[in-house]
Image (spheres, grey):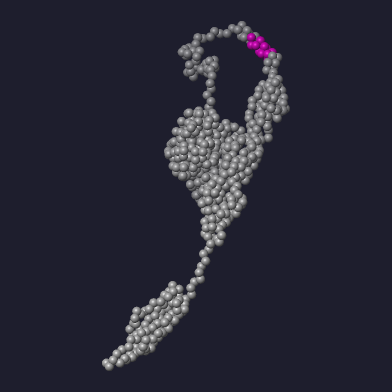
Amino acid sequence: MKKRINDRYEIIKPIGGGGMANVYLARDIILDRQVAVKVLKPQFSEDEEFIKRFRREAQAATSLSHPNVVNIYDVGEEDNLYFIVMEYIEGYTLKDYIQKKGKLHVHEAVHITEQITSAIEHAHENHIIHRDIKPHNILIAKDGTAKVTDFGIARAISEATITHTNSVLGSVHYLSPEQARGGHVTYKSDIYSLGIVMFEMLTGEVPFNGDTAVSVAIKHLQNPVPFLRDKDPAIPQSVENVVLKATTKNPLNRYATADDMEKDLATVFDARRNGETRIQLPIDDDEATKAVPIVGNVNVDDQQQTMIHNQTTGTISPTNPNNTEQPKKKKRTAKFWVTLSLAILLFLGGGLYVAFSLIPSWLHVDEKSIPDLIGMELEEAEETLTDLGFEVENELRYDDEVEEGLVISHQPRAGETRKVGTLVTLVISEGTEPVEMIDVVGETEQFARRLLEGYQEIEVEKRVTSDYEAGTVLQQTPNAGDLVIPSETVVRLIVSERPTYYMDNLLGYTIDEVRELLRDNDLLELNFVEEYHETVEEGKVISHDPPRNTEIREKTTVTVVISIGPEPVEEPEDEPITVNVPFTVTIEQGETENEEETTPEYRLRIQVMDLFNSTPRQVVNRDISSTETFQIPLTVAPGDRGYILVYLDNEEYGDSPYEYEYEELKQYE
C-alpha cells in the first residue's frame, strides 16, 4: 500500500477490511485531521460497470450530513486505485461490540436503534436506500454514538455484474424477504434489516441460521422471526412489538417510514405501555404461498369430456355443437344382447388372467437393504448406491467433527429396505463452518491473544516503531472479515516494539552539541538546567540524568545540567558606622565706639538626623560668644546619609543642614 494517496492522504496504518475493500487510518495533510480511507481491492478496478456505479452511489452519499451517519469527505481514483475518504470513528463495529458484550441491555439496544433509525430516515429523505443494514456497517464510537456507514455502496455491488464477491454471506442474515426473492427493494427493506439488527442486539444472535446462504434466505421468506420474550422474558412487550412490526414479511405491514419506527421506539419505556399485549399482524397468504402455474399441453379427450353435459343444462356439447335434436336409435335385438354378454365375459376372463399372472411380474421391483455409508467418502458412497440401483442426491452441511467430503448421515438409514430406484439423500460434511476473521489491529498483543483463543497458531513478528505504544497490533493476516476456520488457521500478527536506546555520554558537550546529537531520537525529551561549577567551563554539560549507558525504551525526559561558571564570591556587607564629626561654629568679634572689642552672645542649637534619628535630635543647646568646635555624633548605614542642622539665635547657620555620606564619614573613624 502506497504511503500517500492523491498527495493528500498520508496512510498511517490498516484498521479494517472486508471482501470488497481495505480500510486505512490516514491523515489529511491539508486539513490536518485523521480520516478513514476505504480502498477498493484490485480485482474490482477491472469491472468498469461496478466502478461507474460505485462512484455514482458514493458521490450521492456525500450529500448526507447527520450525526449518526459517517460523513464521506472525498471520492477519487489514482493509478487505477479507487478510494473513498470518510470520517474516522475511533471505536468498534456493532458486530464486534455484540460479540464482546453478548446481548445488550434493553435500554442500550433501544438507544442504539433510535440513532440508527434517525440516520436511515435522513438517508430516505435524501432518496438513498442503504440496502445492506447490518452490524458490520454500524460503528460505535467511544462515547456511545452509533454511526451508519456505506450508504448507497450496497446498490453498486448488487447492480453491477461482478462474481468475485462473497459479501452476500455476511449480509444474508439481515436480508429482507423482498431482497431474498429478488424483488423490488424499497425504503422498507432497510426497516426490516434494522429489525433483525435490533433482534441480534437483544439476544446476542441472529434469528435465522442455516448451512448455506440460500437456506438462510429461504427462512427469511417463510419463517416468522422468533419471539424475543421467549428468549428473554425481561424484555418489555412494547420492545418486542417494535421488532415484530419491523420484521413482518409483507412490507405493507411494516412501519410506513423510519420516522414512524423512531417515534414508536421513543415511547417503549413509557408507563402507559406497561400492559401492552403482543401485536397480531395479518397473515399475507400471497406472500407465504404463491400458486405455481401448470405448464404443458391439455389432453383433448379430457377437455371434451369436461364439455359434455346433460342437455337439460343447456350446455353446448362438442358432439352436437348446434344442439340440434338427435335421430332416434333403433331397438336392440336379442342376438345383439347375447353377443354383447359373451364379449363382456371374455374380456373379464382375460382381464383376470392378466391381473393374476402377468401384471405382478410386470410390476415387481427388487427391494434392497440400504448399507451403512456414514464415514465414507462421497464418491465411494455414490458408487455403492449406484451399484445397488438407487438414485442419489447430495446435501452439504457444515460439521465440526466429521472431515470434509465424508458422509455425515443419509436417508433412508442403514438397514432399511427400499425398492431399487429409490432416491437416497447423502448428507456430506463441508468441514467446520468458516467464520469472519475478527479485527485485532490496534489492540494490545495480550488482548489479541485472548480474542484469538481457538485458532491453530498465533505467530508474532516485532516491528520497531516509536509511533505506537509497545505491544500494539499493527497488521494481521488473515485480514478482518476474511472467512476462516479458526482451528485450521495460523494467524500472523505484526506487533509494535519500541526502539531501544542506550544513553550517550553528554559530559563536556555544549547545549547545541547535545541537541544535534539527540535530534533524531524520538524517545528523548531534553530539559536543560543551569548550575555553578568551579571547574567545568561555562556553557558545557556538568551531568545528565539518566546517566551514560542507561537502557531507554519508553519516552524519557533527560535532565541536562549546564555549567554557568564558578559561583561569585560575595564581599562582606559594610556595617553602619558611628563617628564624631567635628563641626566648628565661627563667631565674629564686634567693635565699640572707642574701637574696643566686645563679646556678644548667641544661642546655639545643633540637631542631627541619621540612622537612629529620622526626626531631628538636638545635641547642643547653649549660648556661645566665640568660635567653638563641637564633636557631633552621627550613625549612618552604607549607602545612606546623615545630616547636621545648626541654628544661631533661631536662624539657620551657614548652609545648614549639612549633609554627610557614608563614605565621607569613614574618614572620622
Q: Residue at x 51, y 31 (%)?
A: 44
**511 relative to 653, above or below:** above
Write the start and end of the magenta stretch as one range.
Answer: 343-356
In this view, the residue in front, 207 or 365, is: 207
In this view, the residue in front, 584 or 235, is: 584
**Residue 368 in which image quadrant:** top right
**Residue 199 in which image quadrant:** top right
Residue 437: x and y in percent read 59, 38
Magenta span contains residue 608: no
Q: Is residue 298 left or right of residue 487?
A: left
Q: Residue at x 53, y 21 (%)?
A: 295
Q: Is residue 319 visible to the viewer in this orientation of the structure?
A: yes
Tell which residue pokes out farthest to the bottom in this image: 594
**323 relative to 493, above or below:** above
Helix, strand or loop for the magenta stretch, by majority: helix
In this view, the residue in front, 604 or 45, is: 604
**121 relative to 507, above or below:** above
Tell how many labels: 0
Residue 49: x and y in percent read 47, 28
Q: Residue at x 33, y 91 (%)?
A: 599
Residue 347: x and y in percent read 65, 11
Q: Residue at x 48, y 18 (%)?
A: 315
Tell which residue pokes out farthest to the top in this image: 335
Residue 283: x and y in percent read 52, 35
**Residue 220 in which image quadrant:** top right
